[in-house]
Image: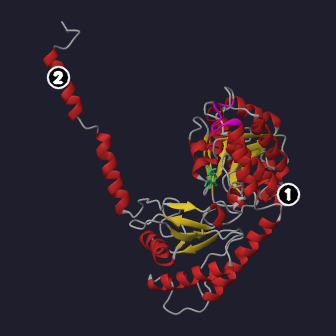
Amino acid sequence: MPRPFLTRSEEKVSVGAIKNARHPFYDHCHQALDQIKHQGRYRTFTPLARQAERFPLYEEAVRDLPQGREVIVWSTNDYLGMGVVPEVQDAAIAAIREHGAGAGGTRNIAGTSPLHTQLEAELASLHGKEAGLLFISGYVSNQASLQTILTSMPGWICFSDRLNHASMIAGIKGARGSQTVIYEHNDLKDLEEKLAAAPKDAPKLIAFESVYSMDGDISDIAGTCALARKYNALTYLDEVHAVGLYGQEGGGVSQRDGVADQVDIIEGTLAKGFGVHGGYITASAEIVDFLRSTASGFIFTTALPPPVVAGALASVRKVRAENWRRESIFERVNTFRHRLRAAGVPFTMTPSHIVPIPIGDAERCKRICRRLLTEYGHYATPINYPTVPQGTERLRLTPGPFHTDEMMDDLINALGVLLREEGVMPARQAACSAA
Ligand SMILES: Cc1ncc(COP(=O)(O)O)c(C=O)c1O
């Protein structure tokens, strides 16, 4: 007959055994990390503290040096420098004094302030939609919205661009019971063939982005919406890398192209062109109300903190009202490209504000980045697999309104030396190889 309790000595033995037993997950971590290192995919972070008053200068913590070293950063996603604008900072500071540091609960419990509703109304108006809904990040807005929509009715088919962001893929993959059809990147012919082959009555959704941030190309929103109308599909557009920068008020490429009203759901972030933090969707009143009432990633998490919401609100209002940063970023990007071309430094020509420098090898890419920082005081993120396919590793540069001509020349000189030494550029090259 089994005994209900262990004797004291049996207890000691079993506790000791548990203490000594090593869960297999620990070994798994070691093995996986060894493999990641072996493949050159191990991620090391560079500690860089932004200098709000000297942006785009950052302070790098250097071992053995009492004070940090100033470096010029070329890869921030705060494209317009809105995070360091005094009115944005002041709004955040005032909100923290008035309302405290955190929201104190989910939107349902205690996390809905007038600031939250004002920001949602501002974003809805920016995109010409009936309503908006805030999420704790752009990632969560994509993941939660897509997963919730695609599990709402039986039989959903999601047509997803091959290069969609990980957050959209997470939402689409998490929608159990729905079907996913991946179409070739920005290829409307392929999309149409796939839409035409799908059952006519199945509920369909097309998920795509406007600016694809790693390649810097831009999708045909009008063409995609025309196909959506023809095959009765809902459209879900990620404007994360476009809001603030494109359109007469920074409403994104859909605003620039005059097609925002053709898109059912426009998703964006407050963390890039608006320089603060948070994600959102804008859409018709019933879609927003549905997601507000059913999306787990919206309902069961603490709301964005008041200083973040106040800062974002000030930023969106400023970005809508003032055009000079938008004009300036494209002037700066064009100047940068001209200077790269004149110096014979290879870059990929894109229709957006993103300037990729192709390197083509993970180790070399990381080495160039490290040398650029340690020897020349410039920082540009190395983009490696799995963010981009192997063999297409690159540096991704995003010059902004505050990068001066002198900063550009200094960087381009450094790139010229390093790319030659690392065999990316021939020893002497005069012509531009932009493609
Ligand atoms: C296309 C795209 N969508 C969504 C996100 C997530 O946005 P957030 O950084 O606000 O979470 C990113 C982040 O880089 C992105 O590149």
Q: Is residue 105 magenta?
A: yes
**Seen from this angle, which residue lies furthest front?**
66
Q: Is residue 352 visible?
A: yes
Q: Main secondary structure of the magenta part?
A: loop
Residue range corresponding to the magenta coloring? 99-107
Q: Indicate the amino acid at tag 2.
A: Lys
Where residue 203 appears, as percent x and y from the top left, is 72, 38
Q: Is 40 placed above or below 181 here?
A: below
Quarter of the image where one finds residue 50 = bottom right
Residue under the point 63% across and 78% down = 407
Residue under the point 38% across and 63% down = 39
Q: Identify which residue, 361 or 108, lies in the foreground.
A: 108
Q: Is residue 102 magenta?
A: yes
Where residue 8 appears, as percent x and y from the top left, is 16, 16
**Seen from this angle, which residue lies furthest top?**
1
Q: Residues within 10 Å of mark 1 (few under 14, many from 20)?
A: few
3D distance between C-alphas at marks 1 and 2: 71 Å
Residue under the point 71% across and 50% down = 268
Residue, disc 2? 12
Q: With 6 as the anchor, is 208 left or right in this view?
A: right
Where residue 344 appears, as percent x and y from the top left, is 60, 87
Task: Classify mark 2: helix, strand or loop.
Answer: helix
Which of marks 2 and 1 precedes in the sequence?
A: 2
**Seen from this angle, which residue lies furthest left?**
9
Where residue 384 appears, as percent x and y from the top left, is 49, 64
Q: Identify which residue, 271 or 256, lies in the foreground.
A: 271
Residue under the point 71% across and 68% down = 352
Q: Is residue 283 visible?
A: no
Residue, disc 1? 321
Q: Residues within 10 Å of mark 2 (few under 14, many from 20)?
A: few
Task: Classify mark 1: helix, strand or loop.
Answer: helix
Q: With 416 as the anchor, is 83 left or right in this view?
A: right
